[in-house]
Amino acid sequence: MGWASRTRHSGEARDDRTITEPAQSSGSAAVRAASSSKQAMSAALVELIEPYRDEVSSLDGYRTLVTIGAVAWNLALFPEDERQNHFDQAAREIGPGDEMSEMVLALSRRKEQRFPDERRMIVSHEVSETATGYHLVAVSAGFEEA
């Protein structure tokens, strides 16, 4: 059983709002969603991975970056003393590598700094390419520790 399977998701609320980001990093992201008091999970995830955005130049690279960002976001939801165990499990799923581990840990810290009160877990995401850039859909649910 994976680490996400051992968590409870509170409620059935999901955030299906989407974001389209220019394929080149020269423009700002344009959110296509109804405004709400909470930031769209897609927009939050794009903001989280922004420092690494210039390092990817392909759809597959962007998909990988979004996946790493989602893993980092979810890790940050756990108490500090439980993260290493969850991180080890996630590392087995996304593959080995010191650089990858450093990126996950750095993004996890960034999530804590930029979104300290955000308790939604990213349960799925999808990235596609459009004529204007990459299109990200991120789905989330409330998170409570098991």
Image (spheres, rainbow, N blue to C red):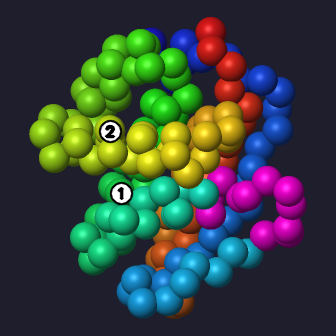
Residue 36 is inside the magenta segment: yes
Q: Residue at x 52, y 46 (%)?
A: 113
Towards the viewer: 113 or 143: 113
**Label 2 to label 1: alpha-carbon separation:** 13 Å
How many labels sit on residues? 2
The label number, if any, that marks residue 65 in the structure image: 1
Local crowd at mark 2 within 10 Å, few (<14), some, or many (≥20)?
Answer: many
- Residue 137 in view, yes or no: no
Q: Earlier in the sequence, mark 2 or mark 1?
A: 1
Local crowd at mark 1 within 10 Å, few (<14), some, or many (≥20)?
Answer: many
Helix, strand or loop status at disc 2 = helix
Residue 15 is inside the magenta segment: no
Q: Residue at x 15, y 35 (%)?
A: 96
Q: Residue at x 41, y 13 (%)?
A: 81
For the residue marked with disc 1, what is the amino acid?
Answer: Leu
Tell me the magenta residue range.
33-43
36 versus 80 height, above or below? below
For the residue marked with disc 2, what is the amino acid?
Answer: Leu
**Location of mark 2 (residue):** 105
Q: Is residue 38 left or right of residue 129?
A: right
**In the image, farthest residue toward the top:** 146
Towards the viewer: 139 or 142: 142
Expressed as whole percent of the image width and height from the top left, the position of residue 54 reads 30, 75
